[in-house]
């Protein structure tokens, strides 16, 4: 049976401000991945981030990522978690 778990999640990215200015967008991507791993109970290699989500995190450059982001996470049977921007 194909059972998918789908959630709309707002991820706070407060800790990105702790990173050096030249690494903040990279840190934001890592935080999204870690948050999804923790809340959807997935392995790091099973979390797939959409390109639109990545572009949204990088839209204002490396120094100024958003302070929070709302995403839609879908977990499939095989453990893969697909993360996209919430509409």
Image (cartoon, helix red, strand yellow):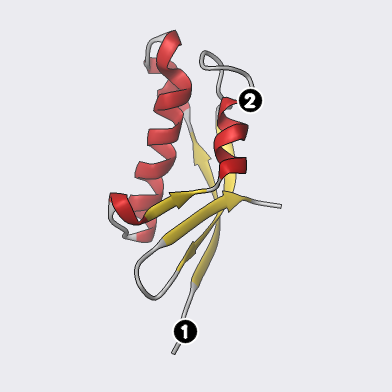
- Choose between 45 and 9: the one closer to the eye: 45
Q: Residue furthest bottom?
A: 1
Could you tell me if the residues under marks 1 and 2 are in contact, i.e. CB atoms within 8 Å? Answer: no
85 sits to left or right of 22: right
* Picture residue at 32% right of the left edge, 60% below the top: 41
Q: As displayed, is residue 43 above or below residue 54?
A: below
* Picture residue at 45% right of the left edge, 30% below the top: 28
Rendered image: mark on residue 21: none
3 sits to left or right of 60: left
The quarter of the displayed image where residue 75 is located: bottom left
**SS assignment at label 1:** loop
87 sits to left or right of 39: right
The quarter of the displayed image where residue 31 is located: top left
Q: As displayed, is residue 64 above or below residue 66?
A: above
Image quadrant occupied by the N terminus: bottom left
Residue 6: percent from left, percent from top:
53, 67
Residue 86: percent from left, percent from top:
65, 51
Q: As displayed, is residue 6 above or below residue 29?
A: below
**SS assignment at label 2:** loop
Residue 19: percent from left, percent from top:
37, 16
How far apart are labels 1 and 2 at the CA level?
A: 35 Å
Residue 83: percent from left, percent from top:
51, 53
* Picture residue at 48% right of the left edge, 31% below the top: 13
Residue pointed to by mark 2: 59
Residue pointed to by mark 1: 2
Q: Residue furthest front?
A: 51
Q: Residue furthest right?
A: 87
How many other residues sit within 10 Å of disc 1, few (<14), some (14-19) or many (≥20)?
few
């Amino acid at each position: 049976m194909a059972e998918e778990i789908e959630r709309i999640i707002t991820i706070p990215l407060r800790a990105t401000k702790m990173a050096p200015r030249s690494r903040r967008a990279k840190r934001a991507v890592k935080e999204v991945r870690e948050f999804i791993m923790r809340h959807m109970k997935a392995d790091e290699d099973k979390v797939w981030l959409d390109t639109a989500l990545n572009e949204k995190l990088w839209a204002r450059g490396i120094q100024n990522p958003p302070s929070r982001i709302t995403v839609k996470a879908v977990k499939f049977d095989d453990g893969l978690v697909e993360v996209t921007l919430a509409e």
